[in-house]
Amino acid sequence: MTLPEDFDRQLVLATQAGLPLVPRPYHVVAETLGVPVERVMERLAALQESGAIRRIGAVPNHYTLGYRFNGMTVWDVDDGNIEQAGTIVAALPFVSHCYQRPRRPPAWPYSLFAMVHARDEAAAREKVVTIAQALGPLSRGHDVLFSTRILKKTGLRLSP
């Protein structure tokens, strides 16, 4: 069987909105694309290994699950300690994502960002305290910015 040159693009288009919610989703994708299921699985693995796809997994809607207090915690960490601090924060089980961003002094001294989710504000603030304790003297200050509405909830999408 000869596959089209743009098979990877077709595969991404067929899966970017999510895999079918059936017992054998890769089989459905393979049938849709008219290729063997092994080809779908091989290419997805190769795309993931190359970094073109970061991960394949479930993405729960935390609002639907009752996690309505979502706070972006921001931390003032010395640039020389950012890797260490990021590793500490990213390892916490309740941090959904953690990354470095440029600071904009004097108004914005923060360079480490970490998102936390909780069912109520008190629980979210407890998580912020836990992060502060984990960072100890690596943190020179912090704040938490709570979400007030959802503006966008999708990643990059290819156009057909």
Image (spheres, rainbow, N blue to C red):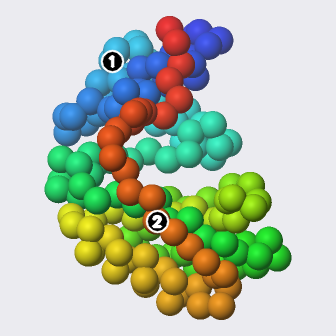
Q: Is mark 2 on a helix, strand or loop?
A: strand
Q: Mark 2 packing: few (<14 Cα in 10 Å), some, or many (20+)?
A: some
Residue at 43% x, 84% y is 130
- State the residue position of label 2: 144
| Residue projecting furthest to the front | 107
Residue at 48% x, 34% y is 155
Q: Nearer the viewer, residue 114 or 120?
A: 120
Name the spot of residue 131 as percent of width and height, x first. 48, 80
Residue at 23% x, 49% y is 63
On screen, 48 above or below 144? Answer: above
On screen, 137 above or below 57? Answer: below
The quarter holding residue 37 reads top left
Q: Is mark 1 on a helix, strand or loop?
A: helix
| Residue projecting furthest to the right | 80
Q: Mark 1 packing: few (<14 Cα in 10 Å), some, or many (20+)?
A: few
Name the spot of residue 142 as percent of width and height, x first. 56, 73
- State the residue position of label 1: 31
On screen, 135 above or below 78? Answer: below
The quarter holding residue 122 reads bottom left
Q: Tag 1: residue type?
A: Glu
Residue at 66% x, 81% y is 140
Q: Tag 2: residue type?
A: Val
Q: Which of 102 and 81 is in front in this view?
A: 102
Badge number at residue 93:
none
On screen, 32 above or below 16? Answer: above
Name the spot of residue 125 as percent of width and height, x first. 35, 75
